[in-house]
Amino acid sequence: MNTWSLVKKDDRHFINPFLVPGKQLNFDPKNEEFTKHLKAVTNKLLLQWEKNVKAEIDYTGSTNWDDSSIYTGTSGYALLYFEAGKILNSAEYLEQAFFMAEKCTMHLHKPNVKSLTFLTGAGGPLALSAVCAHFLKQPEKEHHFIHRLQSVYHSFEVVTNSSSGLPDELLYGRAGCLYALLFMKQYCKEKVDGDLIVHIAEAIIESGKRLAKELQHKGHKTPPLMFEWHEQKYLGPAHGFAGILYLLMQVKDYLEPGVLENYIRPCLDFLLDVRFPSGNIPSSMGSDRDRLVQWCHGAPGFIHCFVVAAKVFHSDVYLKAAKQCADVTWERGILTKGFSICHGISGNALAILHLYKHTNDLVYLQRACQLAEIVMDDRPHEFRTPDRPLSMFEGMAGVIFFLLNLLDPEKSDCSFPGYQINSFDKA
């Protein structure tokens, strides 16, 4: 029986019932009772989610396939099946992932500049279809979907032309296109066009240089790269610096000599400088409101960025920053918005779990498990109901994604979907 309860701190988050100042957590994440409960709840939620998805979707027709995005649509369902297939070693789930992803590619609208990325556009279903075909040893289809996605990106000059109006951020911009290619490349290796990766990365950097110079000419003090979306200089992973810098560091072997030290590192140091006294990070430049603690805006989304920065630059400064972000997330990350991975508890817990994977420090696994207890609790709480309750980024698919990775974090990637990628060397 649970001995904790949730009390609202403000309209954004609850007081963490497990946080006692001056005391360490007294919780064994590997105790039999917890692991049994985790497995049972994960299995129950997965089965219930599958039932609801099958009730929602017309598998033989075209109903309810309009939103084929990873973020809120049917490709996100396919991505959960893919993750479940890997973690549970289930060929059935992998086949279901491929069926759904391929079905999504059949319902894609004609690509336009606003629908190219992994999370919100054609990049998601096409890249996922290629990877599923790779896992299922269907090389012709693997080649087909790789070629199809790369042809889309080659056909839109805005993807590789830094002077175009395409934004650079993750959800709708070049970084989201770059992620789609890297998602394929981590599995399909040299079959993915390395030159296209180079061109997109270069376009992002040139675009960042241009905006920085424009702002500097107007008298603003900026780092050597600057990015904006809808005229806002966002800092978090969804629309801003963290997502862009993270992916540029992942393709470090594709970048020109000097880019890391002369452009990326100063931008990382800029992020360190703009932190609030609490350790949280503003949602955008100029914001003085220390309120948001979620993956898309605030400390949780910077954990991944600072962890990879610590690896790339061999710097404990960035690792310390990642740990401070995790502390903020632990203290203020039980959100009234609910359980989602984009702006909810599961995304915050998944970010903390990633830090455990990097440091092997048990305290972060303990924290992720305690947040999972809240996610798994079936008592009524004052959480908001998501608009798309089955989806990957707003609904139950993302919750299950987190719980699946928590089942055996030593073997799982514990990667944030659509953002985090495993490092690889240039092929």
Image (tube, rainbow, N blue to C red):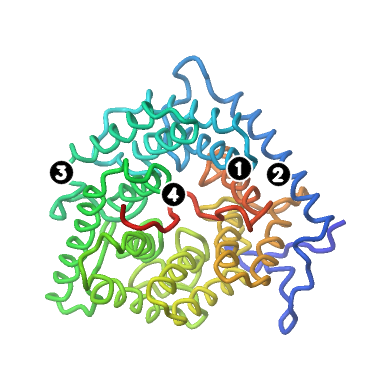
The secondary structure type at the circle numbered 4 is loop
Q: Which residue is mark 2?
A: 42
Disc 1 versus disc 3: nearer the observer: 3
The secondary structure type at the circle numbered 3 is helix
Disc 2 versus disc 1: nearer the observer: 2
Q: CA distance from mark 3 to mark 2?
A: 44 Å
Three-letter amino acid code of the residue under disc 4: Gly
Residue 108 position in % (x across, y down): 35, 28
The numbered mark, 4 or 2, whose residue comes first in the sequence reads 2
The numbered mark, 3 or 4, whose residue comes first in the sequence reads 3
Residue at the (30%, 36%) spot, across then down: 149
Quadrant occupied by the N terminus: bottom right
The vertical placement of 97 against 41, above or below, is above
Q: Which mark is residue 418?
A: 4
The secondary structure type at the circle numbered 1 is helix
The numbered mark, 3 or 2, whose residue comes first in the sequence reads 2
In the image, 211: left or right of 129? left
Q: CA distance from mark 2 to mark 1?
A: 11 Å
